[in-house]
Amino acid sequence: MKVPDGFSNPQNQVCLLKKSIYGLKQASRQWFHKLQISLTTKNFVQSKNDYSLFIKKDGNHITIIAVYVDDIILTGNDANCISQIKNYLHDTFSIKDLGILHYFLGLEVAYIDAGIFLSQAKFTQDLLKESKQQTFKNVVTPLPHNLHLTTDQGPLYDDPSYYRTMVGKLNFLTNTRPDLAFTVQYLSQFMQNPRLPHASVLQHALNYVHTTTNQGIIIKGSDQLKLQAYSDSDWASCPNTRRSITGCILLLGSSPISWKSKKQSTVSRSSSEAEYRAMASAASEVTWLVRLLEELQLTSLKPVLLHCDNISAIHIAKNPVFHERTKHIDIDCHFTRDKVLEGLLQLTYLPTQNQLADVLTKILPSHQHHQLLSKLGICGAMVARLTPDQKVACSIHEVTLFRNFSSDRGEPDLAS
């Protein structure tokens, strides 16, 4: 590092750096604070629902900035404002303009006639190369049908770190692969002491990933976007704890934008209670997403349709009268009922075979599995008919910031 001002240095020597700024606990906070101040001076407002999001509104024009450390995505419907903010960031920090967004944090973005196709093909290929498998088989479902694993089944696996690494990478893959969400949730239960049967199921999941390497989701554009949610549960499906699985997925228009597969925190005494808890989880996600989308000037979302395939759970949520059968249910589970009374949610029943969240709660037969994926807009790259040279009306730009602060302005030096 350069010698500080005030020290005699006739031979123009440098100091040996023993600890970089990135080793300090407050480095990340200080960096984001500086970036936040710089953006707010240009009339950008930090989102209250996602602190890494900055929004600037000017009449009918809107400009959106999404920040991840020193990588930034800019989009909006005002090309002039986007150009101005890029010039400002370059003058303030020095940036590398990467142009139209095609690759970001392992996510690949391709523009097609229907909208935007999101995938993680390169990350998938790298994951498969790091696996111990030399050959792969073609399988049609992420997990074998009628699978039942327990924590103490079979001998211990000799390489638990490999098991944890692969499951962790599969977890990152769920950013564009809702079909893997239940698989990751299932395999994560055995992270502490993986056994040979667990490793065998992991191998099956990797075979499925290899079979569907180029699979992703299509984000379709529409003039009238409505938000709708699907919630489902698999009652007492865990043989070890007898807890149920919650699955919920949210669609904006016909495109999935949020999904979750998670084991419930307590044991449910009935399938209705398990479904009721799943509805509460979906209602919480809907509440947050509605606030976030309204910040992005997407209004007229209420009431949001919440689809459930359990009539009893719907009756409990709609009826404000205290039921004898719900005395033992925690107060936070009645969150759904409150949102129904507020007018945010409208509960509807749909048959189980049309329940899109079913793919997040259990192992399905291959026909039903692929049928639900097609309804969710999950397909391979070839099916999406990619056209990379497609021009889009609302361009998305990516820039990388070079954190070079000038010391003569009295600002911290976070040079990378």
Image: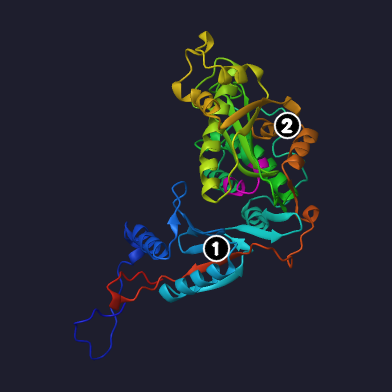
Question: Would you say the residues marked 2 and 1 are in contact, meaning their CB atoms lie under 8 Å apart?
Answer: no
Q: Residue furthest front?
A: 59
Dot 1: within a 10 Å radius of its alpha carbon, few (fewer than 14), some, or many (20 or more) residues?
many
- Nearest to the eye among marks 2 and 1: give it: 1
Q: Position of residue 23 (x, y in %)?
A: 34, 61
Chief SS of the magenta region: helix
Q: Is residue 152 visible?
A: no
Q: Residue visible at 31% across and 72% down?
A: 17
Could you say which is closer to the camera, residue 320 or residue 368? Answer: 320
Q: Please determine whether, in this image, residue 220 is positioned above or below residue 276.
A: below
Could you say which is closer to the camera, residue 399 or residue 185? Answer: 399
Q: Is residue 354 magenta?
A: no
Q: Is residue 174 magenta?
A: yes
Q: Which residues are magenta?
A: 171-180
On screen, residue 1 versus residue 158, left or right, reads left
Q: Is residue 107 visible?
A: yes
Reading the chain from its start, which is encountered first: label 2 or label 1? 1
Q: Residue visible at 51% across and 63% down?
A: 72
Using the rendered view, name the quadrant where residue 105 is placed: bottom right
Q: Which residue bears the numbered disc 2?
A: 364
Residue 118 - label: none
Q: Which residue bears the numbered disc 1?
A: 74
Q: Position of residue 67 (x, y in %)?
A: 48, 59
On screen, residue 110 versus residue 247, left or right, reads right
Asked which secondary structure carries label 1, the reply is strand
